[in-house]
Amino acid sequence: MLKRLMVVMLAVLLGGSAMAQSGPLRLTITDGVIEPLPYALPTFQAENTEATQVANDLSRLVAKDLSGTGLFREIPSSAFISQNSAFTQSVAYPDWRAINAQALITGAVTVSGNQLIVKFRLFDVFSGAEMGGGLQFAGTVDGWRRMGHKVADAVYSRITGEGGYFDSRVVYVAESGPKDQRQKRLAVMDYDGANVQFLTDSAALVLAPRFSPTGDRVLYTSFESGFPRINILDVASVGRRQLTTAPGEMAFSPRFSRDGSQVIYSLANGGNTDIYRSDLNSGAAIRLTEAPSIETAPSLSPDGSQIVFESDRSGTQQLYIMSANGGDARRISFGDGRYGTPVWSPRGDLIAFTKQNAGRFHIGVMRTDGSEERLLTASFLDEGPTWSPNGRVLMFMRETQGAVGTSSLYSVDISGRNLQPVAINGGASDPSWGPLQP
Amino acid sequence: MNILTKVAVIGLVLTTAACTRPDRFGAGAGDGVNTGSIAPIDPNAAMTGANDPKSPLYFNQTIGDRVLFQVDTSTLTDQGKAILNGQASWLQTNSDYLAIIEGHADEQGTREYNIGLGFRRANAVREYLVSQGVPANRLRVTSYGKERPIQVCSAESCYAQNRRAVTVISIASLS
């Protein structure tokens, strides 16, 4: 079970009134080439002996989060001049400037029984000033990773001016077994692959789980009956129910509305597949597309007014946008190849998609009018992007080819940089990135 | 394929049970047959096995339970139609059986689209069988998209086998 974290502002510590010489520290994330911002993160001070291990692990986790973005570069502690970095001590800025640390992160950790308190501060070394007030997180010892992620989110957010994404979870399909007898079950993990928890067993084929906006529920497709049906699962209790109960109804590709009260999905009727919207409470369903082609993979805009989806009405899979109430759709993808699995970014400005062209698969992004298409990856099979809560990173599935082909999860910046695998034991597919946790 | 195998196995088990049930013809070998022991049953020789034209196994093996498709199409080939003609006539003769038509796709395609494509293929088979006189209410369609490949290589030789619609005879009786 998740531990509730308490966040409290520390009383303002020290003056930190030194004037900035060349403007405050600010890393603006752009699409240009970025020189990672060098920072120093002395191991957080253990305020009692019980805290030593956690202080060490938590410091490494914060550094891993920050450096893992590709936007920050940690300066090794062997380069430090000032080894003494007691949390309450005033900062020896010249020592940190000398090794070109632009940011300094200090912290302290206290453990009493099962209780863990983490405090941290962030300094703009070249301005000689603290950035924001100190923050303190309190929780239980086994929730230390979440507290580390929260520290990293606060640092990321203060330096970039954008929301973080480290204290978040991802629901996905855990895979095992050979390709022709693949076992699939739902699982959730921290964004970095830690704390895996299974939500279903592998008795029935399950596909494409999607988190609710608050991360409390998951929609997914289950073949429990031999026919695809949509289930909704409560993450805390792992209780689940089938969404649609009409006999013979075959539904898949569900996603929540932004307020979590409705679901948009595909429903197959004979050989035809169209998009519907259904109210989770009343069960009332509205048909949104009426075409003899395959309409699927719907995703709502952040304001809930529009739906991007894929359709092969033109002869091949392409992306279209229509009103959330259905009606006329306009095509937005016009490049070579086929486009599928569109997902609207949380900022509303971009559509992420899967593209197939010339025997290769790509994850890409385009603006909502279809302009500025950018392919971020290329492989035998890349599929199904999902956005980080701040809209800066995409996670997706990559499958290797051949008889021993396996699926795993990767992430990539929307700039196309920083492609990296997510560390999970075993196969994994169909990620859905949940919100930043409260 | 799992469902298919299961149906066949159930058929065999039932057969075996019926033929070896000791009180069927009186205890032991008391039915007049002068063999001292019960001979092991050859599944292929059993009348509900592959040699029995009324058996699902016969349907699967002799008539052919599947038709194949070209890349990203649901158009039936002449070869496919020939198989479906056999399926239609079998289903009309053996009117106690239902059939579930499973549509499948190869791995070249996204997950959701392939489910839609599988439905198209299954439905093409269903419509053809209905056109040949099989009552529509005995046929159901489903789609597994690219989730259930039977061949695992990443080459056309395997993809061609995976782009299929399989007619799975259901043991459930209509009566």
Image: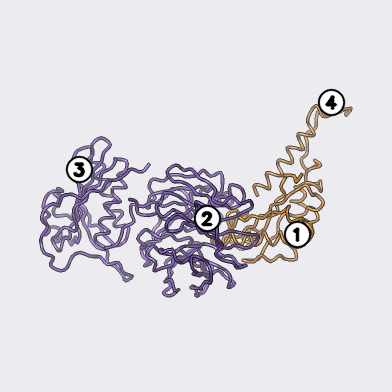
Of the residues tagged 4 and 1, which is closer to the observer? 1
Q: Residue A28, position in %: x, y?
A: 27, 67
Give amino acid for label 4. Gly
Query: Which residue bears the numbered disc 1?
Result: B130
Mark 1 in CB contact with mark 3 (< 8 angstroms): no
**Is residue A408 something one can see in this rendering?**
no
Residue A405: image tag: 2
| Circle 1: residue type | Val
* Quadrant in the picture for the C terminus of chain B: top right
Examine the rendering and report whether any part of residue A133 can be seen: yes
Chain letter for mark 4:
B
Numbered mark located on residue A46 in the image: 3
* Front one among A209 and A395: A209
Q: In this view, does B149 lie to the left or right of A334?
A: right
Determine whether label 4 and label 2 are within 8 Å by CB: no
Location of residue A224 with respect to A93 vertically, above or below: above
Question: Between A139 and A337, which is closer to the camera in this rendering?
Answer: A139
According to the image, label 4 marks what residue?
B26
Which hue belongs to chain A?
purple
